[in-house]
Amino acid sequence: MKRLILLFLAGTSLALARQTAPQLPAPPLSTLPDGFSAPSGYGDSIYPLLGDAGLDVTHYDLSLRSDPRQDVISGRAVLSITALRELNQISLDFAGPKVLGVKLGGRAAQHAQVGEKLLILPPTPVTAGTAFTLTVAYSGTPALQYDSSTGGGLRLGWITQAGGSYVLSEPDGAHTFFPCNDVPADGASFSLHLDVPAGYTTVASGVQTRQVTAAGRTRTDFELAQPIPTYALTVHVGRLKLETQAGPAGIQIRNAFPVNLPDDVKATFAQTPAMIGFLAEWFGPYPYPVYGVAVSADPQIPALETATLSTFPARPEQPTTALHELAHQWFGNSLRLGDWSDIWLNEGFATYAELLWAQSQGQSAAPLLERWYARLARVPARGLPATQSLQLFDSSSYFRGALALHALRLNVGDGRFRRILADYVGRFAGRSVRTADFLGVAQQIGGQTALDAMRPWLVGPQLPPFPKGFFTQAVR
Ligand code: ARG
Ligand code: ZN
């Protein structure tokens, strides 16, 4: 089966090859202190210098002391790591505050902050397969990082403004505030210990396990046992009001709204329990014990599917946007990208979920499909694998991705389409995925004609003609 898919891909120039020029400035080699060497990066095809292919970080234990009035954080990050090969040097992504000390196991280790990397020299090489912990203490102002995937207009990472702090990291902002292997392929679970001035409310990815107020500070702990990509972690600190709701299947729902938020913004999220129930019917169980949204004070930021707690701007949004971010909890957070070029596996699927929801509300799919196609017809066409960062969140990732799924659905019929989605999620929940993984499931259940139906949408660059009967055709 894998063979057929590779042939399918090879025959169509579907670009899985690593071909993009590095986009991050290389760390200035001239400034590397003695004994350190230039890190090679994980080798992601869009962000090749991020991460380290020799590391598997399984857990981050983060203690962060912050103050939204000052934009400074003091952190202690304990990383549980397995060496995937022999390590003479450990390289983490970290553009953040000044590192005060690093311990490997319990012992102080030599380190250097170079460019956006934190390099650590183990006293003796770490042998492949070894599990070890790395403790990093740091303090200062989180790094200023702007989003290359949208042309630099959006600040990423830990952001303090208007009397609050929030985290919005996709794609590469996580390393502004904690040292990490900042590639989605390396997911990890998290423990968070967040210490803020009393009077502020903290909410974050995961289940709240403990809260203590003493000596004018409030510490709140969160646990997220399921692995997520680093960019999906969020924290919100502010003058917030928490509102809880009962969700389906014992899922806890908590939303965090700025105290003065208008009701029409909150109304966007009224249908969360029904949406969780609906998507679980299509994709299988919601992947976490908790969900909700946190609305930032900023009206300008894009909505983002931060894990278990989607982040929204302070402006009214369509309920379909709420549905979209919820769908990403399966597609993006639970099934995480093995490579950024496969971003359509996130955006195309979350967009298609909007159509499934619309149909469940008695609406026709036709206007949505037409709108998506019209959006694509206005922009230069490209095949689905992204080849540069500016393509990550373009119309093709969202709408061509969604139309590829619709083409598959029409070919295989509703019954098998459901099985393909549920099987794909069941097989890869908590793991990283590539386009070939999805095509493998589609082929196994839908056969070669299923792949043939998707092919013109997957490969580029031309936009396939809008198929006759694309939405009127009866779904079997
Ligand atoms: N993944 C987000 C979504 O739900 C989009 C993020 C867009 N922008 C960004 N720079 N990361 O569609
Ligand atoms: Zn999305």
Image: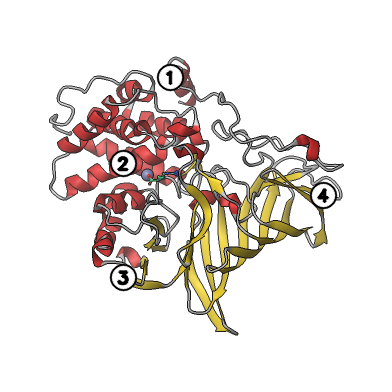
Q: Are marks 1 and 3 in contact (CB under 8 Å)?
A: no
CA separation in Å, label 3 and label 2? 26 Å
Mark 2 sits near ligand 2, with its Cβ under 8 Å away: yes
Please name the amino acid that badge 3 sits on: Gln
Nearer to us in this view, 207 or 248: 207
For the residue carrying disc 4, how many other residues have a C-alpha within 10 Å: few (<14), some (14-19), or many (20+)?
some
Q: Residue at x 56, y 47 (%)?
A: 145
Provide residue 69's location: percent of width, then percent of height. 53, 69
Tell me the residue that label 4 is attached to. 122
**In this rendering, position of residue 367 left or right of residue 354:** left
Residue situated furthest bottom in the rendering: 215
Q: Nearer the viewer, mark 1 or mark 2?
A: 2
Q: Give the number of marks.
A: 4
Quarter of the rendered image showing ligand 1:
top left
Rendered residue at 45%/69% (across/down): 238
Q: Which mark is residue 245?
A: 3
Dot 1 or dot 2, earlier in sequence: 1
Q: Of the numbered discs in the image, which one, if any, rests on residue 351? A: 2
Local SS, label 1: helix
* 44, above or below 467, in the image: below
The amino acid type, in three-letter code, at marker 4 is Pro
Task: Find residue 427 and report its horizontal and vertical position in percent.
Answer: 44, 43
| Residue named by callout 1 | 8
Q: Where's residue 211, x and y in %?
A: 52, 78
Which quadrant of the rendered structure holds the C terminus? top left
Q: Is residue 397 left or right of residue 164?
A: left
Given contact means CB atoms under 8 Å apart, are the residues at marks 1 and 2 in contact?
A: no
Q: State the residue at coordinates (51%, 56%).
A: 233
**Mark 4 or mark 1, which has the lower sequence index?**
1
Q: Earlier in the sequence, mark 3 or mark 2?
A: 3
Residues tagged 3 and 2 counted as in contact (Cβ below 8 A): no
**Which picture quadrant has residue 115?**
top right
